Amino acid sequence: MRRLVWCAVIGVCLPAAAGVAQEPRVSFAGHQLVRVNVQSEADLALLQTISPDLWTDYPGIGQIDARIPPERVDALKASGLSYVVLDDDIGPETSRHLNRSPFRGAFDDYMTLDEIVQYLDTLIAARPDLCERFSIGQSVQTRPLWVLHITGPGSGPKPAVFYHAGIHAREWITEPVVLYLANYLVTNYDTDPAVQNLVDTLDIYLAPCVNPDGYTYCWNTYRLWRKNRRNNGDGSYGVDLNRNFAYGWGGGGSSGTPSDETYRGPSAFSEPETQAIRDFIVGHPDILAYMDYHSYAQLIMWPYGYANVLPPEPDRTTFNTLGLEMKALIYAVHGVQYDQGPIYSTIYQASGGSVDWVYGAEGRFGFTIELRDTGQYGFELPPEQILPTCEENLPAILHLTQFAADQVGVHFSFPDGLPDVRPGGEPTAVQVEVTTSYDTLVPGSPTLHYRHDGGAFQAVPLVLVSGNLYEATLPPAACTDHPEFYFSAEGAGSGTAYIPAGAPSETFTALVGEFVMFFADNCETNLGWTVVNSTSPALTDGAWDRGVPVNCSRGDPPADYDGSGQCYLTDNSAANGCNSDVDGGYTWLVSPTFNLAGADATVSYAVWYTNNYGSAPNNDVFKVYVSADNGTNWTLVQTLGPATSSGWTVYEFRVTDFVIPSDRVKVRFEASDLGSGSVVEAGVDAIFVRQLECACSNPGDGNGDCIVDLADYVLFTDCLTGPGTFSVPPACAALNFDGDSDVDLQDCAEFQSVLDRT
């Protein structure tokens, strides 16, 4: 990296918030950091009576990091809980952070709030042509929420990004990461064309500390403070700002108890800090990418956290792709592994988080990264790891920034979705919503582009319905066609936008025909399913069974999915006290063999799955496989969990997406208990296999491809001049318009009329 801009801090401090008295500093001398293997709700409750501070953000069954004061060490030893000591005395590290002298400089030491603000001013002084700072609001104790705005010359609309740190006060590594990005952009602007392009293309907004009251309280009084400093009126202080956003507010993974670390506040956006973030994002529709930095766990996460719900396509793929790319970029710097995925399934449930609201309510691509480490130091990451953490995260955030820079200002969505299958010989209407972020739409520019069988694309303007809503009409297609289509629209300043983004090389497709039932199983009788249980490790309980759900165990479904009565379940015996689940290995439910040779088929099924019912899951998952050789080889189709699903959920896959259809296709459902402390229950119901067929009844469609065209004209001529009955060319029946015994001159006028309409 090139030079780092920094001016020595020489005793110039911002005034303390008015009316805030400083309390004596809390000492953590002799306090231990331990990692406890929590195996039950009773274990968790016991741990909470021993530890005043669980460092794991989403405590549940599994491994939990906890702070143990000296006077409670004996209680932990006597508890019977299984644990390891990560740090036998966190006090020295805390004191080293707070009592540093002298200050060694940015990215070698943690900075106080005053030093952070001075660092921003240092950057501004170095490049006033690129930087400015402003406040987007105030904290509970009236401290300003500073944002550094970085952008280059150039007028006209620009896309923007907004990245912030410090929403949880004790997560001190987050502030340097944001400041390091600011420094990199400013100091490399003149020498690095890629940096100059980013800064000139974008408005970059960086907020290094959005919880200034909590951060200051960490430095002055209580190093491990998490929340803001709201007086809750009951003797407790603080709201968890990352549980105070409106999307999914009040759900699991947050607390309604004011003294708890994850207290969500009395209402969504009750806090001035979250109100300021909300108002800034709402007021800047040009913000296309968002990052909320946290520590610790080394994770890259995206929506959603409030429930086991994923973003719709194509955003789901975009999130996953960006997450994987950022993961690889981070690893390439220092070989440090960060995992990635949706918040709910990557950590645990967390409701009212910033990322869910940014995407779910505002439609921006929101991420959160949990920085170093994975528990050795936790929130007290040594200053020696500040610079390496900044270095490894820089390429990832630059990649997300470039993603935003590459976006045009016009966006598409499909309120009713896109058709996967469409009837042959009929036009298909598609609703298209065209919106803009930082740009304006060129009137009349939204367009449908389509073609059949690789021909030239035809362009048809979309029809404006109202507001931002348009309608496109896909023209009739034959069953033998391979229709492709995409959409375009033009932004006044940003140019032409396409969906899919890679059009015309990348297009949407829709199968022509209809799916008809090949195999239907409501699980009332056994239609050929077999159960296979693991022997190494040996399954000890919870094998697949068919019956009416008993509904008296942990996580059992209250009833089957389709109301027929029975379904397949993992152990359904009331004789076991209704507490039996999958234990010790895996159990397979294997289908009969399906002859799908040459067919385009789909498989749909309803799944019920729980893992640690009523608490946090471990890593056990539910898997679905397909085989094209009677089970000799299996291809993974789907993985559910480890988070618990929300009731019965229907899923579907297309066989050709995973294997070449044959006459030996099988499907397999797998429930497993391979981790410790899990309560795994699963159910499957309403299993359907459907095949695509060309089915239509268009008058004049003699060859049965669902569309009337030149081929039918040739056939009509043959029928007209050929035998007088339908027995020789039976397709002539579709060309007999007047209903007599043959195709004759009386049918010509009607057939000509059909041709004229197509």
Image (cartoon, rainbow, N blue to C red):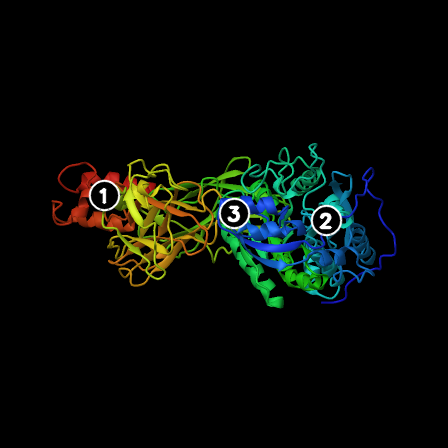
Residue 118 horizontal/vertical position (percent): 82, 53
Q: How far apart are marks 1 and 3 (CA)?
A: 42 Å
Where residue 556 sits, quadrant-wise, is top left
Mark found first going from the N terminus, 2 or 1: 2
Mark 1 touches mark 3? (CB < 8 Å): no
Q: Which amino acid does label 2 sit on?
A: Cys
Q: What residue type is labelled 1?
A: Thr
Residue tagged 1? 525
Residue tagged 2? 209
Mark 3 touches mark 2? (CB < 8 Å): no
Say what secondary structure mark 2 lies in. loop
| Image-based side of 706 in relation to 259, left or right | left
Residue 750 horizontal/vertical position (percent): 25, 38
In front of the other: 24 or 79: 79
Residue at (41%, 42%) from the top-left corner?
554
Mark 2 touches mark 1? (CB < 8 Å): no
Q: Residue furthest right?
A: 11
Local packing at callout 1 (Cα closer than 10 Å; few below 14, some 14-19, many 20+) is: few
In front of the other: 139 or 711: 139
Residue at (34%, 52%) from the top-left corner?
481
Q: Nearer the viewer, mark 3 or mark 2?
A: 3
Q: Can residue 367 be seen in this view?
A: no
Residue 306 horizontal/vertical position (percent): 54, 42
Residue at (43%, 55%) from the top-left corner?
456
Local packing at callout 3 (Cα closer than 10 Å; few below 14, some 14-19, many 20+) is: some
| Image-based side of 574 in relation to 160, left or right | left
Residue 619 horizontal/vertical position (percent): 47, 54
Q: Is residue 747 visible?
A: yes
Local packing at callout 2 (Cα closer than 10 Å; few below 14, some 14-19, many 20+) is: many
In this rendering, is residue 85 above or below 729? below
Residue tagged 3? 43
In front of the other: 129 or 240: 240
